[in-house]
Amino acid sequence: MGITRFATKANFRLQSGMIEADLGEYIVQYINDVAKQFNLGPLAINVETDGKGFIQKFKPIDVSIVIDNLIANAKKRQTKATSINFQVAHPSKHTIHITIIDNGKGFDEKIEDLNRVFEKGFTTTDGSGLGLYHVRHVLGEMNGTIEASNRQDQNGTVFLIRISK
């Protein structure tokens, strides 16, 4: 219901679930108008953009699922993150990059290959191990990829999403 109200408020049409709009603008508006408003607890959510456009066909619900899942992972008590930042950049007119950085504990160093966090059923928490698996699947359908890493300069995790036309 919140997504429907947001999509209407932001002038995004939900025809057959697929719209053609500025994906970066949708992400920024969704985070500012929905994710922040429904965020309960101490996690600060921020979003920045370079302001360039990226018109793409996408399902708003899919983008919402990706954003919500990454926020939910940062909020888990095991990560102890107090902030999560989304950075939307357009390295070319055919590509959008979304970098998600939190200041939590980061991934356990026992995980030798961080690609495993996207495997079905893989979890280091009390979760189901389906969230990041689903995120990768959704992004694959959008001609996108996601990579995970630990922050090099301090505690936290980094996800890099790349979507191309």
Image (cartoon, rainbow, N blue to C red):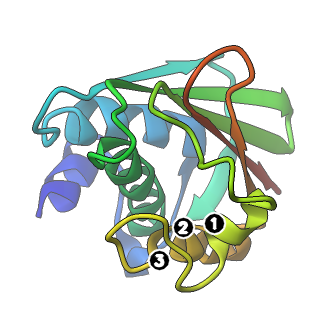
Res 119 → quadrant: bottom right
* Three-letter amino acid code of the residue under disc 1: Val
Residues marked 1 and 2 touching at CB (< 8 Å): yes
Asked if 159 appears above or below 36 in the picture, the reply is below
- Which quarter of the figure is the N terminus placed in? bottom left
Q: Which of 36 and 59 is in front in this view?
A: 36
Q: Residue at x 39, y 64 (%)?
A: 125
Name the disc covering residue 40, or none.
none
- Which quarter of the figure is the C terminus placed in? bottom right
Q: Earlier in the sequence, mark 1 or mark 2?
A: 1
**Mark 2: which secondary structure?**
helix
* Three-letter amino acid code of the residue under disc 2: Leu
- Tag 1 residue: 117
Q: In this view, does 107 lie to the left or right of 52?
A: left
- Tag 2 residue: 132
* Three-letter amino acid code of the residue under disc 3: Gly
